[in-house]
Amino acid sequence: MADITLQVQGMTCNHCKMTVEKSLQQVEGVTQVDVNLERGSVQIQYDAQKTGKDQLEAAIDDTGFDVVG
């Protein structure tokens, strides 16, 4: 298992949080998602044999939010 924390711009409410969580949970290999609205961050635990940073960022981008940094 691997962990990554991504900074995500534009998340402001629980609907934003649920949208990002749902999108990431649909990525094969993702086992846990924790969105922190205050910090604008998403902590993701995933199987590095099944997915990677590019796929995780793409899943967030698909929701209309931007990964920064």
Image: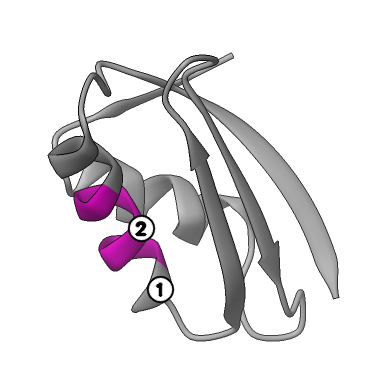
66 in the magenta segment: no
Where's residue 64, x and y in %? 14, 35
**Residue at (55, 50) in percent of width and height:** 34
Callout count: 2
Where's residue 27, x and y in %? 42, 76
Among the 4 quarters of the image, the one containing residue 65: top left
Quadrant occupied by the N terminus: bottom right
In depth, the one of 36 and 52 nearer the eye is 36
**Residue at (42, 24) in percent of width and height:** 37
Where's residue 32, x and y in %? 60, 69
Residue behind mark 2: 21
Residue behind mark 1: 25
Q: Colour mode?
A: one colour
> Magenta segment range?
18-24
The kind of residue on which mark 2 rests is Glu
Quadrant occupied by the C terminus: top right
Distance Cα–Cα, label 2 vs label 1: 6 Å
In depth, the one of 3 and 54 nearer the eye is 3
In depth, the one of 40 and 56 nearer the eye is 40
**Residue at (39, 63) in percent of width and height:** 24
- Pointer 2 local density, CA inside 10 Å: few below 14, some 14–19, many at least 20: many
Question: Considering only vertical position in the picture, is 22 above or below 14?
Answer: below
SS at mark 2?
helix
- The reply to whether callout 2 and callout 1 are in contact (CB within 8 Å) is yes
Q: Magenta region, mostly helix, strand or loop?
A: helix
The kind of residue on which mark 1 rests is Gln
